[in-house]
Amino acid sequence: MELTYYLILFFTSFILTWIIVPVIRAVIIKNRILQKPNFRSSHSLITPSFGGIAFFIVFIIGVLITPEIVEKVFDSCKMGKYTSLLMRGSMVSAYLVILFTGIQDDNKILSPLKKLFGQFLAAAFIVSFEQFRIKNFYGLLGIYDVPLLVSVIFSILIIIIFINSFNLIDGIDGNASLNGISISLLFGYLFYCIHSMFFMGFCIIIIGTLTSFLRYNFSSIKKIFMGDTGSLVLGLTFSILMLKLLNIQDDKHFTFPFDFNEMPLIILAIVFLPLFDTIRVIVLRIKMKRLIYKPDRNHLHHYVIDLGFSHKRASLIINTLNFLFSIFIILLCINFDFIHGLIAYITIILLLLLFLNRK
């Protein structure tokens, strides 16, 4: 039953995206809303954007429908109607705000401050649902339970930081999509450990959507970018999943093969690529006395492209290494402990920085 349920979710999201993306592409071309190459671009041709609208449509359908399926098919996973409605209400409201923000940003009519406000508003809708707020620091700096105000502020900051981080890695074909698939696979595993049918199913929906989108993103004939619309929607989605995973201390039935207090480190390993790339780029911009929101070609994907790799190969190399890194940290936590995982995490960051500074 479970396997059938997840297969249906995968193929439904895959087919829906396969159908919706060409429609969006046709509308964009007809209305001449095309993305022109600039000094940062790795493309020489004018290309349609807004592919992320397909993500929004599929994810909204998933949010509205799959909780009902879960409650009817898996009785043991019932959330309760009131809780389910609150969760869906907060998610749909946030998605609508971030969709509008992304579309405006793709149209180049949104200032950085207005874009940040849109992200803040979306984050506020998410943390209005109690189960999407961090309530525990897991002993970090000796802190466990945190006050409500700290919980709300910290949760909003995590959402905004990750939305922007994911937005920044969408610079070459397939990079954001492949990273999204990688994150969804590993998050899906973590939700499987706590028997969370809806959120594991939502990870499957993301995988189906992004797998289907790659066909168009890598195409030379029917190419379309996800745009800021897509990267913002994905960034918000993974922020929601992160907060849910960091807020499961009340669930007494999880079956993780590692110590629960190692969860923050494991999540940091899974989302390593967008966070590492963003922090590194911001530090470089500050060092060069540039505004941190001004774009440049200092991203990790630009480095790999400049080595002579195609977009597809660069994206595959970056995300394969990122996936293996995540697995490595998870295995260290399973077979050893938090300290071994943390030492390996820091060591790999330092080695990567040394490698990149050779440029």
Image: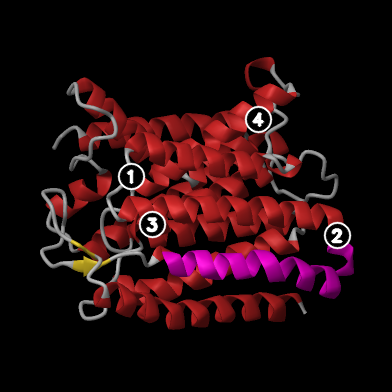
Q: Residues within 10 Å of mark 3 (few under 14, many from 20)?
A: many
Residue at 31% of width from left, 70% of height from top? 217
* Alpha carbon distance from label 2 to label 3: 32 Å
Spot occupied by residue 229 in the image (x, y as percentages of width and height): 40, 57
Colour scheme of the rendered structure: secondary structure
Q: Residues within 10 Å of mark 2 (few under 14, many from 20)?
A: few
Q: Is residue 188 magenta?
A: no
Disc 1 or disc 4, which is closer to the eye?
1
* Alpha carbon distance from label 1 to label 4: 26 Å
* Alpha carbon distance from label 3 to label 4: 27 Å
Q: Are marks 4 and 2 in contact (CB under 8 Å)?
A: no
Residue at 62% of width from left, 34% of height from top? 337
Quarter where residue 266 is shown: top right
Circle 3: element type: helix
Quarter of the figure that contains the N terminus: bottom right
* Alpha carbon distance from label 3 to label 1: 9 Å
Q: Is residue 46 above or below residue 331?
A: below
Quarter where residue 317 is shown: bottom left
Which residue is denoted by mark 1 in the rendering?
Answer: 110
Can you tell which mark lies on residue 103?
A: 3
Q: Amino acid at mark 1?
A: Leu
* In the displayed structure image, the side of residue 304 where residue 143 appears, left or right: right
Which residue is denoted by mark 4 in the rendering?
Answer: 152
Q: Amino acid at mark 3?
A: Ile
